[in-house]
């Protein structure tokens, strides 16, 4: 295989750095003005990039939002979980729900942007669906495997179904409860406790 020339390698690095600046700027401007009012020129100025590069690299504002969504999902699947492995499935679900809440609150601006855009933009729902593919978090699957290996969870448990249920709980509580409803932490914690107990007791199994 032909080695890349130093000039080509430098160009690739420059493009990656420019794309990163544009995405960071888009995230800031979308959060500041909302998607519809956000201007590409302002994004380019904040990113210190040529305006034409937004179209070349991302295909415009729609492509920027799709790329931000993709980046958001990819970042969530990197690395491990922020809490140690738990001794029971109920404790693992409870810990995971709280970890996702912390993540969502840390990234509240992009979460609000994605959800609000998906609610009104049918085209984004189609393209965004490709990024939000609903695949089980590999970190969570690994934790369930540890419990299965220890004989604490049935080997026939349907992890995909369990994860889907957890994600529905997480979205409902995090977005409508914490972000929109501003529910107190004690109420959020009680909800997570109740859902974790219910999901752990009603283990989905493969048929």
Image (cartoon, helix red, strand yellow):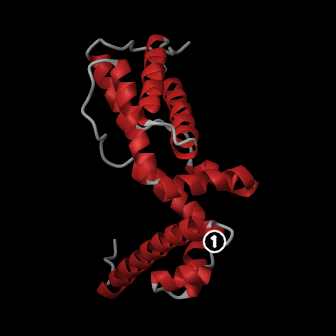
Q: Give the left or right position of residue 4, taking residue 116 as reference.
A: left
Quadrant of the image occupied by residue 133: top right
Residue at 35 percent of width and 30 percent of height: 95
Using the rendered image of the protein, determine whether residue 157 is visible from the camera's viewpoint. no
Say which quadrant the N terminus sits in. bottom left
Q: Give the left or right position of residue 56, taking residue 137 as reference.
A: right
Give whichever of 177, 68 is nearer the camera: 177
Quadrant of the image occupied by residue 138: top left
Give whichever of 121, 53 is nearer the camera: 121
Q: Position of residue 70 (x, y in %)?
A: 51, 56
Q: Position of residue 175 (x, y in %)?
A: 55, 43
Quadrant of the image occupied by residue 148: top left
Q: Give the left or right position of residue 132, taking residue 75 as reference.
A: right
Give whichever of 43, 8 is nearer the camera: 43
Q: How many marks?
A: 1
Residue at 51 percent of width and 37 percent of height: 183
Q: Is residue 44 above or below residue 116?
A: below
Say which quadrant the C terminus sits in. top right
Q: Which residue is mark 1?
A: 61
Q: How crowded is the residue under tag 1: few (<14 C-alpha within 10 Å), some, or many (20+)? A: some
Residue at 43 percent of width and 38 percent of height: 137
Residue at 52 percent of width and 57 percent of height: 110
Tell me the element at label 1. Answer: helix
Q: Give the left or right position of residue 22, taking residue 114 as reference.
A: left
Using the rendered image of the protein, determine whether residue 195 is visible from the camera's viewpoint. yes
């Amino acid at each position: 295989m032909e080695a890349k020339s130093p000039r080509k390698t430098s160009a690739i690095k420059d493009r990656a750095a420019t794309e990163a600046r544009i995405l960071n700027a888009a995230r800031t401007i979308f959060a500041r003005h909302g998607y519809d009012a956000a201007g590409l020129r302002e994004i380019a100025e904040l990113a210190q990039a040529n305006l034409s590069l937004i179209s070349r690299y991302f295909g415009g504002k729609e492509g920027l939002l799709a790329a931000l969504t993709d980046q958001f999902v990819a970042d969530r699947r990197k690395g491990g979980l922020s809490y140690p492995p738990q001794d029971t499935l109920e404790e693992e679900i409870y810990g995971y729900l709280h970890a996702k809440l912390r993540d969502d609150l840390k990234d509240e601006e992009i979460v609000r942007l994605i959800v609000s855009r998906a609610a009104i933009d049918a085209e984004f729902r189609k393209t965004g669906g490709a990024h939000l593919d609903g695949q089980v978090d590999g970190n969570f699957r690994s934790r369930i495997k540890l419990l299965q290996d220890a004989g604490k969870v049935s080997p026939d448990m349907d992890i995909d179904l369990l994860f889907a249920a957890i994600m529905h709980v997480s979205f409902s509580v995090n977005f409508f409860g914490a972000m929109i409803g501003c529910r107190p932490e004690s109420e959020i914690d009680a909800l997570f406790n109740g859902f974790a107990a219910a999901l752990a007791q009603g283990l989905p199994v493969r048929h």
